[in-house]
Amino acid sequence: MLLDKTKNSIIYFDNAATSFPKPECVTDAVLNYMTQIGANPGRSGHKLSIEAGHIVFKARKSIAALFGLKNPMQVIFTSNATEALNLGIKGILQEGDHVITTSMEHNSAIRPLHELEKQAFISLAIVQADKTGIIDPKKIKEAITVRTKAVVVNHASNVLGCIQPIREIGKICKANGVIFIVDCAQSAGVVPIDINRDNIDILAFAGHKGLYGPTGTGGMVIADDFDHKKIKPLKCGGTGSLSDKIDQPDFLPDRFESGTLNIAGLSGLFAGSQYIQKKPGGIKGIYSHKNELQKHFIQQAEMFVQNFICYSSSNLPSAGVIAFRLKNISVSEAAQILSDKFEIMCRQGLHCSPLAHQTIGTFPEGTLRFGFGIFNTKEEIDIAVHALKSISEGN
Ligand SMILES: Cc1ncc(COP(=O)(O)O)c(C=O)c1O
């Protein structure tokens, strides 16, 4: 970790937007590529190009291992989770299809779906979550019609941190021949995921949040038994392969990876994804660390901070994302004071999820959001609770 907290008193609780600081091995890997390798993979035959190709392959293997995927070629790199969701959603849908999604989705999923619905290209059913943000799988089952092509679900809420029963929902999808697309932007690297066992067909992840890679990284992962030819590419172009042809290659990953990849970013993503997987306790350890931090924060804030309202439940498993507010001050003013006076970085507002805030009754103002990362500690939480107490008391 490069952020020296003895010199720098900043407390960073905005890990749900992007993680910070990154482990030192991540910045080292980016620098190593930029200063020692620099070349374009898959284009030329010289040794630097081959070395760059090795980095990309190692990153693919590391992501495949993280999600229990057997074939690393089914990992498609994109610039973020949004691009991966657009690729999965627009890639599989055809005119007349029916899609089921939920009231907990991020705009990265609901906007592409809503656009297609407005064009009368698809019809869309939005299944309502309960007040704790959880979707009842039975409601998904009831919403399936003969035209249903896909179900799109956000695994871990970027508003409440709660985790959806994806294995159960995926089972229902499998039994009904429906494609299951899961938005793992908040859960990748935080909650243990097995793409095959969790019955996911298409998984979207962000490389820059729980995987500790640089911004500008993410990807779509296609389950081992899912035929990738069912997905249309979003973009076509140079892949370095089949250069004699003007047809887009139909093999993986080239079908979906046109144009030069973000190799500096993928170098860092490889390092970050290895770092979290090799950390003592692995992903399970990270998951329990975040759950402990969440419980500690809610317990302390409920005990010491007057006017504290928490929307996330300390009784539910969590990805370490907490929505709360102070009754007597607007969320934007509170966030400003946290940043300016107390050097505590968090996010306020709707977190790109208007429907989720409507679900929990916090629309249109939204909430404050703390998103904990692997480097956060209970001591930092205690400082934040003290700051919130002081804000709430008008000091
Ligand atoms: C649940 C969820 N989905 C999708 C996204 C979009 O991720 P990205 O910024 O990598 O496109 C986010 C980002 O916060 C998110 O929280």
Image (cartoon, rainbow, N blue to C red):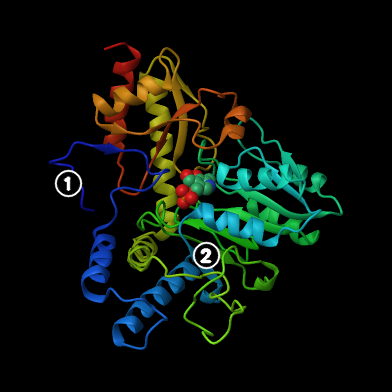
- Residue at 70% x, 48% y is 116
Q: In this view, does 334 lie to the left or right of 5?
A: right
Residue placed under numbered mark 1 in the picture: 4
Q: Is residue 351 left or right of residue 36?
A: right
Mark 2 is on which residue type?
Phe
Disc 1 vs disc 2: Cβ atoms closer than 8 Å? Answer: no
- Residue at 30% x, 87% y is 47
Mark 1 is on which residue type?
Asp
- Residue at 39% x, 65% y is 262
Query: Depth check: 105 or 288 in front?
Result: 105
Query: Depth check: 143 or 194 in front?
Result: 143
In the rendered image, the vertical position of residue 108 relative to residue 326, given as above or below: below
- Residue at 56% x, 46% y is 108
Tell me which label, 1 or 2, sits earlier in the chain.
Answer: 1
Q: Is residue 48 left or right of residue 369?
A: left
Q: Is mark 1 within 8 Å of ligand 1?
A: no
Q: Does the residue labelled 2 lie within 8 Å of ligand 1?
A: no
Image quarter for residue 335? top left
Dot 2 lies on which element? loop
Please provide percent x and percent y for residue 59.
Answer: 41, 70
Residue placed under numbered mark 2 in the picture: 67
Q: Is residue 384 visible?
A: yes
Please provide percent x and percent y for residue 379.
Answer: 26, 36
For marks 1 and 2, give the CA distance. Answer: 32 Å
Q: In this view, does 38 lie to the left or right of 176?
A: left
Image quarter for residue 57? bottom left
Which residue appears farthest toward the right when viewing the image? 146
Quarter in which the C terminus is drawn: top left
Please provide percent x and percent y for residue 83.
Answer: 53, 56
Please provide percent x and percent y for residue 127.
Answer: 72, 39
Q: Is residue 186 visible?
A: no
